[in-house]
Amino acid sequence: GATVGSHYRYLFYVDFLAPADEPNTANALKHLQEMTTFFRILGTYPQGGMLVGLDNLGLQVARPVASAVMKKKRKVGIIGFGTFGQFLAKKMVSDFEVFATSRDDYSTISADLGVCWCTSLEELLQQRLDVLLISVSILSFEGMVRRVAACIAKLGLDSRMLVVDVCSVKVHAKNTMLVLLPDTCDILCTHPMFGPQSGKHGWNGLPFVFERVRLVDARRCEDFLRWWSEQGCRMVDMT
C-alpha cells in the first residue's frame, strides 16, 4: 500500500527590498520563523552597493561592498550639558556629529570633548539635526519642550527630527512631547538606567528602556537604538 508521510523537504530562498531591522520587517521575519523548522537570514546588503569579484577565487564568488562615498555622520543635538549630558556626549562623539547647548556656559568642556557648542537654543535647532536629545531635569522638561516647539514655529525650522528624552518619569515626558511638539517630529522615550558613576567602566549589560512613541522615519529611530545596543546596553523595549 501507499506509505503515509512526507517524501520531500522543501527549502525556499526569499530576496526582498527592506532592512531586516525595520520594525515591520522584523515582526514578519519573526512570524515566519515560528512557522518553519529551519530559518536563517543569509545577509543584508547596502542600498547602492556593487558586487566586486574576489580575485583569488575567480568570478564565481562575489561580495557586496558599500559605495566609495563615506557615509555622513548623523547630527545629534543635546539640550542640557550638565554631568549627564557630558557623559552621553563622550560616547556619542565617536559616531555622531554632536552639538550642545545649556543654561550655563560649557563651551570649554564641549571643545575638549569634540562637541560643537551653541550659545542658544535657536542656534542649536538651526543645525539641521537628525536627533534632538533633551537632557534636563523633570522639573524643567515641560518648559524646555515648550521652548523647542515655540522656536521651531518662530524660525520656521524643518522639524523633521527625532526628539528623545532621558527622563525617568515616562508618562509625563511622553504626553508632554505628544501634545506640544509638531506632528512632524518623531518621538522616542528613553530611560538609560545608569549614569556617570555606574557606567564609568562601560555600558555593557546596563539596561536601556525605550518606547517608540511616534515615528515617520522609522529607519532613523532604529539606527539610533542600534547605537545604544552596540555600546553593550541591555535593550528593554516598552513599545
Image (spheres, helix red, strand yellow):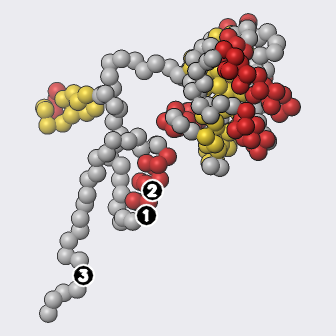
**91 sits to left or right of 55:** right
Residue behind mark 1: 34
Distance (Cα) linking label 3 and label 1: 22 Å
Q: Position of residue 185 (x, y in %)?
A: 61, 31
Please identify the quarter of the rendering in which residue 97 is found.
Answer: top right
Q: Is residue 152 above or below residue 237?
A: above
Report the amino acid beneath label 1. Answer: Glu
Q: Is residue 76 above or below residue 180?
A: above
Could you say whether the residue bearing mark 1 is in a helix, strand or loop? Answer: helix
Residue behind mark 3: 5
Could you say whether the residue bearing mark 2 is in a helix, strand or loop? Answer: helix
Is disc 2 in contact with disc 1, using a CB cutoff of under 8 Å?
yes
Q: Could you tell me which residue is drawn at 20 percent across and 71 percent down?
A: 8
Mark 3 or mark 2: whose residue is earlier in sequence = 3
Q: Position of residue 229 (x, y in %)?
A: 57, 38
Is disc 3 in contact with disc 2, using a CB cutoff of under 8 Å?
no
Report the amino acid beneath label 2. Answer: Lys
Distance (Cα) linking label 2 and label 1: 6 Å
Residue count near mark 3 (Cα–Cα under 10 Å), binned few <14, some 14–19, many ≥20? few
Mark 3 or mark 1: whose residue is earlier in sequence = 3
Could you say whether the residue bearing mark 3 is in a helix, strand or loop? Answer: loop
Residue behind mark 2: 30
Question: Comparing marks 3 and 2, which lies closer to the viewer?
Answer: 2
Q: Could you tell me which residue is drawn at 68 percent across and 21 percent down?
A: 153
Residue count near mark 1 (Cα–Cα under 10 Å), binned few <14, some 14–19, many ≥20? few
Of residues 156 and 24, the one nearer the viewer is 156
Q: Could you tell me which residue is drawn at 65 percent across and 30 percent down?
A: 182
Is disc 3 in contact with disc 1, using a CB cutoff of under 8 Å?
no
